[in-house]
Amino acid sequence: MDIIYDPVFLEHDTGTHPEGAGRLGMLLGFLGSEGIKLLKPPNGEEFLKLAHTQEYIELVKGLCKGAGSGWAYLDGDTPLSAQSYDAACYAVGGAVKASEVGGFALVRPQGHHAFASRGSGFCIFNNMAIAALKAAGEGKRVFILDIDIHHGNGTQSLVQGREGVKFLSIHQNPLYPGSGLRSEENCVNIPLPPGTGDEEYIKVLDSQVKKELEGFGPDLIGVSVGFDAFGKDVGWVAGNDFRLTAKTYKHLRDMLEPYDWFATLEGGYNPESILEGTRALLRMG
């Protein structure tokens, strides 16, 4: 599986925020040591209006221009720096590229808490929703599987009721953002309690997720990968308490094998979680 990456993602400066450039460091070091070639994404600015209002796009652009050497904020959790708009546009381009080549978009900022007219929860533009809506607009049946520990509330809001798209989120409850407690229309939500480990999670994959996939019959699956569900991420962001290991990510990869699929990075704040989770999901030893 190709990995899509651009150094511009490191220029989204969040200061001491847990969603910082350093979270990618261990994985990038490993990829470099293995000589793995990374594909560069296009600038995805042209795709923003598939999910976001022009007013919101201009707001983000203006806030970034005005940030100077400091920060502006979309909300209390979502800082912007001077280069954040460019990084976010390339993150969208990375997700779109991944959907076209069956790759993994190693991007930041992440996206699944971004709504049509507002960003939140570390997210600026909704990378996954844009890639999925673009593919659906081209006639593909797209299944979004969100395995971040937090409910993908922004993604759900953007695809709910959309023909040819199905959204399924497995997430911790109680936990930010507090949504995703029931299924609605084409959106299936599976909240699980704190402390969930491999056995419980794999049971959900083998029963509920597999059933939804077979019933929908997707042409393409987009996986919003949050490695904050990895056991090594416990405590890196307040409240996170899933205990998954590489076993779950390897099992997920086996389940996806019959399908055309791609992935884009969401959460994961311990660099070890991102390294070990990616290696397991992509079968990199």
Image: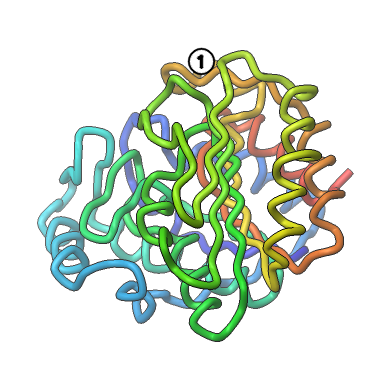
Residue 247, picture quadrant: top right
Q: Is 33 or 122 nearer to us in this picture? A: 122
Count of numbered circles on the image:
1
Q: Position of residue 26 (x, y in %)?
A: 65, 38
Where residue 56 appears, as percent x and y from the top left, is 18, 63
Q: Position of residue 144 (x, y in %)?
A: 58, 57
Dividing the image into 4 quarters, which one contains the C terminus? top right
- Residue placed at 71% from the left, 64% from the top? 261
Q: Amino acid at mark 1?
A: Gly
Q: Is residue 264 left or right of residue 128?
A: right
Question: Is 140 left, or right, of 279 in this rendering?
Answer: left
**Picture coordinates of residue 29 (x, y %)?**
68, 45
Determine which residue is flagged by label 1: 235
Q: Going 38% across and 28% down the picture, which residue do you hit?
A: 176
Q: Is residue 155 above or below residue 56?
A: above
| Quadrant location of the N terminus in the rendered image | bottom right
Question: In what element is the residue under mark 1?
Answer: loop
Quadrant of the image occupied by residue 24: top right
